[in-house]
């Protein structure tokens, strides 16, 4: 991590300022697999805490595996606090695993681009979900998830860049450590708002 931070600090002093003010960021890690993809679907457009609460309700109700979730009724999902749309996405994911259309374990041995091409086929799994899976589960070092509102808002605030395409071009100078730049931007975003997140 130090190598990444030294590199990023030479590109923009703002990264060193974040560390001076708030300390080092946590590198988020989650176990790769079906459960984490379910959690990421639940996290789309809601807070991590709210999604986790729903995720734990599912786990208390049944085994969080493709076999169990593919046969859970829409009514049961609704009772557990899962929206109709997300219920559909979770079932599509479960069916893809059961039908052997998706080999989640095999993703670890593929390139980031191959993982993206495979997961994007599934309705309900977009670039944000794939970015977070690659970063948290497969420790991909060079991604900037511009579908993430906290990242976008922090770039606007700290770098005064307001166009997503410009953000993407600007972030190219942070390669090959764009994921670490992202962790620092999240770190700033959360600390400035006195928020704590357990990944």
Image (cartoon, grey):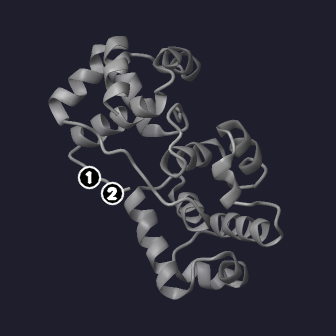
Residue 67 in the image: above or below residue 199? below
Residue 174 in the image: above or below residue 83? above
Residue pictured at 28% horizontal, 34% vertical: 188
66 on left or right of 162: right
**SS at mark 1 in the image:** loop
Quadrant where the C terminus is found in the figure: bottom left
Residue pictured at 70% horizontal, 36% vertical: 113
**SS at mark 2 in the image:** loop
Label 1, residues with CA under 10 Å away: few <14, some 14-19, many ≥20: few
How far across and how far down the image is residue 84, in percent? 65, 69
Q: Which residue is under mark 1?
A: 196
Distance from disc 1 to disc 2, alpha carbons, whole Å, reads 7 Å
How far across and how far down the image is residue 129, in percent? 59, 49
129 on left or right of 11: right
25 on left or right of 180: left
Query: Mark 1–mark 2 contact, CB under 8 Å?
Result: yes
Is 89 in front, or is 112?
112
Quadrant where the N terminus is found in the figure: top left
How far across and how far down the image is residue 195, in percent? 25, 49
The number of discs equals 2
Q: Determine which quarter of the picture holds residue 96.
A: bottom right
Label 2, residues with CA under 10 Å away: few <14, some 14-19, many ≥20: few
Q: Which residue is under mark 2?
A: 198
Is 40 in front, or is 133?
133
How far across and how far down the image is residue 99, in percent? 83, 70
58 on left or right of 11: right
């Amino acid at each position: 991590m130090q190598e990444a931070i030294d590199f990023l600090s030479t590109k923009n002093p703002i990264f060193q300022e974040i560390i001076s003010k708030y300390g080092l960021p946590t590198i988020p890690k989650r176990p790769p697999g079906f459960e984490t993809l379910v959690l990421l679907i639940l996290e789309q457009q809601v807070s991590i805490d709210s999604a986790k609460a729903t995720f734990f309700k599912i786990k208390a109700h049944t085994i969080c595996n493709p076999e169990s979730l593919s046969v859970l009724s829409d009514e049961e999902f609704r009772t557990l606090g899962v929206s109709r749309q997300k219920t559909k996405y979770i079932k599509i994911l479960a069916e893809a695993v059961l039908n052997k259309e998706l080999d989640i374990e095999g993703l670890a041995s593929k390139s980031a681009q191959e993982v993206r091409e495979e997961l994007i086929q599934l309705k309900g799994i977009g670039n944000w979900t794939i970015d977070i899976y690659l970063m948290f589960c497969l420790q991909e070092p060079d991604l900037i998830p511009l579908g993430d509102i906290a990242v976008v808002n922090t770039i606007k605030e700290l770098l005064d860049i307001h166009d997503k395409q410009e953000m993407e071009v600007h972030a190219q100078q942070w390669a090959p450590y764009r994921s670490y730049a992202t962790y620092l931007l999240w770190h700033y975003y959360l600390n400035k708002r006195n928020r704590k997140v357990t990944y």
